[in-house]
Amino acid sequence: MPVVISENLAVLIVVALLSAGYVMPLLKKIKRFRVAEFFAVFVLGLALSGGLYLAREVLHNGAFTYAVGGWSAPWGIELAVDSVSGLFLITIGLVAAPILLWASVDLVREVGSRARAAWYLTLYLLLVAALSGLAVTGDLFNVYVMVEVATIASCAIVAARSNAVSVEATFKYLMLATIGSGFVLLGIGFLFVLTGNLNMNFIFQELSTSWQNYPTALWVGLSFFMVGFGVKSALFPLHVWLPDAHSSAITPSSAMLSSLAVKGYIIALLKVFYIAVGPEIITNLPITDIMTLLGMLAIVAGALFALAQDELKRRLAFSTVSQVGYIFLGIGLGNIHGLTGTFMHIISHGATKALLFLAAGAIIKQTGKTRISEMAGVGFEMPVTLGVFAVGSLSMIGIPLFSGFVSKWQLLLGSLVNRNFLAVIVLVGGSLLAAAYLLPVLRTAFFERSQDRTVKEVPYVQLVAMLFLAVVIIMVGTFPSFVLQLAKQAAGTLLGLEVLP
Amino acid sequence: MRDFVLKRVVALVLPFVTMLGLYVIFHGHLSPGGSFSGGIITGLSMIAFSLVFGLDRSQEKISERMMTLIESFGALWYGAMGLVGILRGTSFLMNKGAGIPLGEPGKLYSGGLILLITLGVGLKVASTMVTLFVSLMEEEEE
């Protein structure tokens, strides 16, 4: 790779995605719209390879910073590329590219017209660019801008299909997400007033010497962050918008939102709490206990809600609430294993939930049935789709050799190290509940006979996209060394520990 | 709207409003305002035109396709200006350090790339305002 590109890669990924997004509306009049869609997938593929390069670079040579516009840290915007960024960039690339490839088959029909499809691609790429920006940024105000771009883009891709249900869901989502943004902005204001800085490293240095002078103000600011990012990432009592938004949107939007958009805010939360404020202050305040508690509540409650749903996409949406609980539980545990589990779960749940949503969308598209109880015998007509659905289910439950096992194992280790046996019970129970809400789908699909035999498998392109995600899940589950090493280093970065590669 | 007075007044005032918008954009680095406020003033002049003379006549002047082009161009222009720094071997959005002459302080050309960047952002903001307005109007007609 030429030096000009590799040195500026962090900013180039974001700029390339943004620019590609704005090229899309210009392409709506070209003869074959598939060209535009494949161009978007190609750009996402480039972003993935850039992310892999950065991750390898960080893993071997350590974190580095990049001054935008040549203005160094407290004055200019600084990008801080560390293993957290590397890991999330890989996740974004691995998940966003196959989702868009899957969507390319009948995007125009799904959203209504070519012009709308072109704008959909713009919004999708803007969302991916904003999430990549969250991954690499080291500046609090930049975090806010990226959070806003991601919020608006994700609201808009929920509304892509203009029927009453998804518009209502979008409105709910927009209101709650905007309240969340307000809280985040207030939190940033608190940190800025306390320290006079927006750069995360400078805030850290400032706070570590002087936070004891105003602990209440810091506590209030941090709870604003907690609520703001909690609403946006659907932490349990604040998740009310998620099931409607994720189940009524078109399939690629649901997959994108459930697997990536929610995680972007968690990455931002981790950066604020562990890089800007620092592990010492965070573990001194009761905020980790609250996160552990809410995480455990989310795991159980989300899974119970999921059990009660008969609509497949709604069940998967509630399953996201439950899985976000695992991620927050890992943050709350606050030790190296717990955080490694959090990062592994971000990548593992990203690929798994995207795969499950795409497979569900494929079933719904081919059969026209949205309820699980109607899906008798689909497995005989769509063996590949249901096969990858089985891979996703097993990974979600946490069976060994699938990626979900690696993350849940780390979370278990983390709870055992903390002697938090309630968390151990909840983790195991959550896996059982996941089996209880996912396996009935497979049972209905494979062990019951259907009447009609007219259903066909989805087109090859969609199969390739789903198989790609299934391979990612199995690869991460069987050969986790690279990703696990990266996740461990990311956890070490947050806790301020040196983790040898 | 068929009001004679309204049409004449708007026809008289609009050129000056557009001019003010462009002035604010071009003097963003010298005086209060900048690409965002200037872009909104420019966009508002076009919105006022279509409110008074009707959507069809404003579409004749600048079609929707042209608006999309301007919008995309504004955003891509910003990215391209950022790349100038990278292509000159320094970092993204670098201005003076990338060897761009800054000009004389206080004069119109005095901020290096800033003038060009605000021009792109101003176009983007103006066309976005118009696009938003047009979509709302079309929604009403349906």
Image: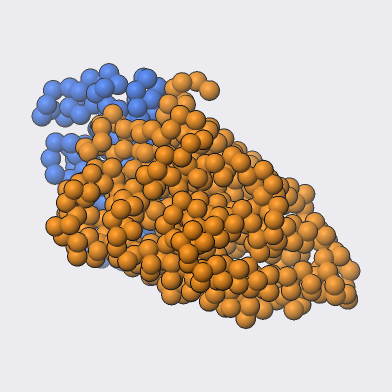
Q: Position of residue A346 (x, y in %)?
A: 53, 54
- Where residue A55 appears, x then y in whole percent? 51, 36
Q: What residue is drawn where x is 55% and y is 55%?
A: A410
Q: Is residue A403 visible?
A: yes
Q: Nearer the viewer, residue B97 or A267?
A: A267
Q: Nearer the viewer, residue A299 or B52?
A: A299
Residue sitting nearer the eye, A116 or B94: B94
**Residue under the image location 61 percent in, 59 percent down:** A353
Extreme-bottom residue of the structure: A308
Residue A359 drawn above or below residue A163: above
Q: Nearer the viewer, residue A102 or A438?
A: A438
What's the colour scheme?
Answer: by chain
Q: Decide if residue A153 is in sight here.
A: no
User: Which chain is displayed in blue in the rendered image?
Assistant: B
Q: Quadrant of residue A66?
A: top left
The spot of residue B76 in percent (x, y) is 42, 37
- Return the residue found at the far left: B106
Q: Residue at x 23, y 44 (%)?
A: A205
Badge count: 0
Chain A painted colour: orange
| Residue at 29% from the left image edge and 45% from the top image edge | A200
Apparent side of residue B125 relative to residue A93 in the rendered image (left or right): left
Note whether B83 is above or below A122 in the view shown.
Answer: above
Where residue A296 appears, as percent x and y from the top left, is 49, 71
